[in-house]
Amino acid sequence: MRSVTLNAGPVNVTPTWVCYRPTPLEARALSPRPDHLDLYRKKRDPARTPEPFGEGESGAETHAGGARFVVQKHAARALHYDFRLELDGVLKSWSVPKGPSTHVEEKRLAVHVEDHPLEYANFEGIIPAGNYGAGEVIVWDRGHYDTFKNEDLLEQYRRGKLELEMFGFKLRGRWTLVRMSRHEKEWLLLKKADRATTDEELVDRYPESVISGLTVEEMADPPAVIQALHDRLREGKAPERELELGDVKLMLATLTERAPSGKDWSFEIKYDGVRVLARRYDKEVRLQGRSGEDITARYPEIAEALADLAVPRFLIDGEIVAADENGRPSFQRLQARMHLKRPRDIQAARARVPVRAFFFDCLSLEGHDLRKLPLVHRRELLARTVPPRGAAQRSDHVLEHGPAFLEAADELRLEGIVAKKLASVYDGRRSTEWLKIKCQRRDDFVIGGWTDPQGSRAGFGALLIGRYEGDRLIYVTRVGTGFDTKGITALHKTLQTMARPMSPFAERSPNGRENHWVEPTLVCEVRFTEWTDDGGLRHPTFLGLRSDKKPEECRREEPIDLDAPLPERERDNLEPEDRVVRVTNPRKVYWPEGYTKNDLVSYYETVAPLLLPYLKDRPVVLTRYPDGIDGKSFYQKDAPVYTPRWVRTVTVTSGDGDRDIRYFVIDDLEMLRYVANLGTIPLHVWSARVGALETPDWLVIDLDPKGAPFQQVVEVAKIVQSILDELELPSAVKTSGATGLHILLPMGQRYSDEETRAFAKLIAVLVVDQAPEISTIARPIHQRGGKVYVDFGQNGRGNTIVAPYSLRPLPGAPASCPLLWEEVNARLDPARFTMKTLPKRFESMTDPLRMVLGPGIEMHAAIQRIEKRMNGEAPKKKRKRT
C-alpha cells in the first residue's frame, strides 16, 4: 500500500515496486464475497509471498468512465500477460500468453484463471521461488473500461462475451473477450476496428511498467538498474550537484511560423496544458508551476506516479495535460483542475478529470546537474527515468521531418509543435535553439473589465482584454464567446470582487456605460484567427483562465523568419574591424513624409557624437517599428536571442526579482546602427550606468500636458527653473520629442534611486504649491483637471526617459532636442526639431544638456535651503506669466 499525505508540502509515497501488504484496518467497507477469493488464497501462503490477500484495497483509483482494468506482465515459468477486469467486487483474470494484440480481429488466447483481489491491480514485485507463480511482475498497463453495448457487464460475462471499451495508457478503443464454446476456461481476446488500431505490437514497443518504469527483466534486480544509471552519469561527465527547484529557470521557445528540418533538429507535440517542474528526492515529491507556485497537492496522481518510479532522485521539466473526449490535450478541460485548492474538491475532480504529465527534459539526476549536456544526452537519461506511457510519462519526439510533423499535428487539431536542436543545452532563457510553431493562433491576455450582458444572458456580455507594452496595459479587444453558463457565473462573481472605478488600460480603452473595470490581475487564454491591422483580434474565443502566468508576461511575440536568416547571425564570428551593419530594406518608408529606413539610420549616424555619451554604459530599451510608424510596433527590453556576440548586452534582474532581462548597451556607432537597422525609432535609457545601477547620473522632472496647452508647459518649466535657481541648483532642459519638456539635474552617482526620487517629488510639490492652477502631481489623467502633470515618477531603478537626440514615431520625425533655458519661451515649438533640422542646429552649437553628466548637486545643502524657504526665511518668487 502507498502511504500518501497531500498538503501544501511534499507528497510522501512508498513506491509500489517495494511490495507492502495493507492492514485489515484498511479493508473496504464492502469487501467481496469470501468464496470469490477462496481459490486464490488456497494457492498462496501470506508468510511466503508479498502478494495481497484481499484484506483491503490499496491505492484504489476512481474514474468517471467505469471500472478498472490492469494488464500485468509476469515472468513466471513462461512469460505471459495477466488481463484483469474489475467486476463483481474482484479482478476477473485471464492469462494471455502473447499479450493483447492491437491488430484488428487478431485473436489471442486468454485462459480464465482464479479471481484476484482488487488491490492486486497495483502489485509489482517479485514472487519468491517455491511459490505459486514465482517470478517478476510489473503493471504493463492500467486504466478504466466500460462497455459499448447497452447490456450489463456482469450479464455479458455470464453469457461468455464481453464487449469492452478500454481507456488505458497503452490499450485504447474497443475489444471483445469471448468464451470458446467447448472450453469453459479458454477465451479469445481480439481488437475491434476503430481509430485506436495500430500496425505494431504494443507489447514489443512499450515493454516498461506504467508504474515503476522498469521492464520485467529489470524488476528482478532494481538496484542494478540504479547502479547502471550511475555508471552512465559518470561517463557523461555531468557535474555532481543536487539541484533545487529554485536553482532552475525555465527554458523557453521562440515563436516562428515555419518548422525547420534537418538532422540536427527533433520535434515534439506542443501540449495544451500547464508547465511543471517536478523534483523527487527519495520519498519527497514536489511540483512547481511556471510562476513558482507549489502545485503538488493540486495534482496528486502526478505526484504519486513520480514517487512510484524506480529512480529516487531527479528534477524534470514537462507539461500537465487533461484530455478531451477525443484524447487531445484540452486546456479548457484542464480548467476544472487548475484553480482547485481544497483537498475534497481536488479528489472529486481527480475522478472526473484525470490528468497526465508529459516530461520532455531531465535537468538533474541522482545528484548530477545535466543542464550543460546536449539535449540528445539528456533525453537518453530521461528515458532511463520516466516510462514512455503512464500517469507520468516522457514525451515522444521525431527527428528531421519538421514540416511533415507540423502538418500531422494540424490534422489532429493540436496546438502546435516544438522544434529543438539536438545539441542544445538547458540554459534557462528563450532561445532560437528551441522553436515553437502553432497550428492555431492563441495567446494570453490580461482581463481589464467586462461588459453588461445582452438579451437573456446572465453575468456578463464580454471580457475586455489587453496586453502589456513596456509598463503600460494596452487594450486589445472584447471576447464574448467560449463561455458556458456555469463558467460565466463563477467568473462574474470573481470579477465583481476585483472591481475598480477607472479603466486599467493606458491606451485605446473603450467607452460606454456598459463597461465595468477590474484590477488587471487575471490572465486568460484566447484563441483567434489573426491580428487585425489596428492591433485587435479577429474571431476571439475564450479558452480559460491561466493561474500559472503573471499579467506582466502577457506581451506580443514576434515570430522570427526562418526563410530570411537575419544578417547579424552571419556575423557572429567576425573580427571587430569587420563588424559592419548592412542596412536591410533601406527604401522602406517609415514616416508619411517619405522618410525611409535609410534616413533613420543615417540620422543616428550623424548625431552619434552627440547621442552616444548619453547611451554609453547604460541599459537601453527599444521600441521597434519594423513597418514604419503606421505599422505594428513592440517594446523590447530583452535583446533578441539572435543578437550577435559583438553587440554588448548586460543582464539585469527585474525589480521584483522575477526574471533576468538582457538589455542592450549601446557604446559605439556600429551598435547604434545595429539597433536602428532593427527598426528602432525611440531609444529609452536608464539614468544609471552599468556597475552603479542603483545610483543615477541625473534626476528628471517630466512636464506632461495631456490636454493642457503647451504654453502652460512653458510656464511651469519657467517656474521649475526659478525654484532651482533660488535653491542654487544647476539644471538643463530638453524637449521630449512630443508635447512635453524634460528638466534634468546632475546627480553624479552620489545618491540612491530612493533619495533621488524623494528629492524629485519635493521639487514637484514646490512647483505645484507655487502654481496650483496650472500644475498637478496627480497621476491619473481624469484627476488632472486639464493641468500640466509634474511627473517625478520617472526616477527610480529601471525607469527610463527618451534619450536626448532620439527620434519619435510621430509625423514629421521630431526628435528630443536639448535647449538653452532662454529658448523656453512663448515662441518655443518642439515640432521644429526634426530628423532634418536637428543635425544642422548642432553644427555650430555645443550641447547645453551635457552638464547633467558632470558632478552632482549637494542635496543636503539644497534641502536646508528648501526648509528655510518653507519657514519663510527665503521669500517665494512670484510667478510671472511668460
Image (tube, helix red, strand yellow):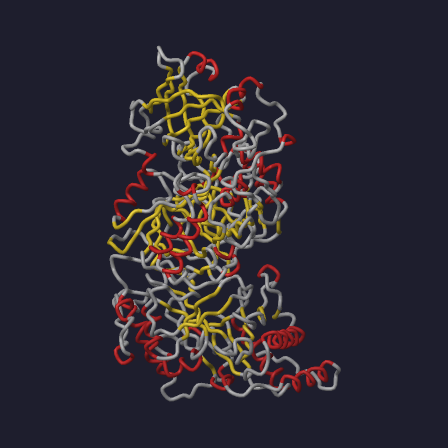
Determine whether, in the image, residue 197 is placed left or right of residue 614.
Answer: left
Q: Is residue 851 visible?
A: yes
Quarter of the figure that contains the N terminus: top right
Residue 403, image x, y percentages: 26, 47
Determine whether, in the image, residue 90 is placed left or right of residue 605.
Answer: right
Residue found at x 28% / y 43%: 407
Compared to residue 613, the image places residue 37 above or below, namely above
Residue 144, image x, y percentages: 46, 29
Residue found at x 47% / y 82%: 819
In the rendered image, which quarter is residue 881 located in? bottom right
Residue 194, image x, y percentages: 32, 26
Which residue occupies the foreground of this view, 242 or 732?
242
Which residue occupies the foreground of this view, 73 or 834?
73
Compared to residue 408, the image places residue 325 above or below, namely above
Determine whether, in the image, residue 134 is placed left or right of residue 699.
Answer: left
Number of numbered callouts drawn: 0
Q: Is residue 511 visible?
A: no
In the rendered image, which quarter is residue 664 located in? bottom left
Residue 276, image x, y percentages: 48, 50
Quarter of the figure that contains the C terminus: bottom right
Which residue occupies the foreground of this view, 851 or 819?
851
Compared to residue 864, the image places residue 762 above or below, namely above
Which residue occupies the foreground of this view, 530 or 639?
639
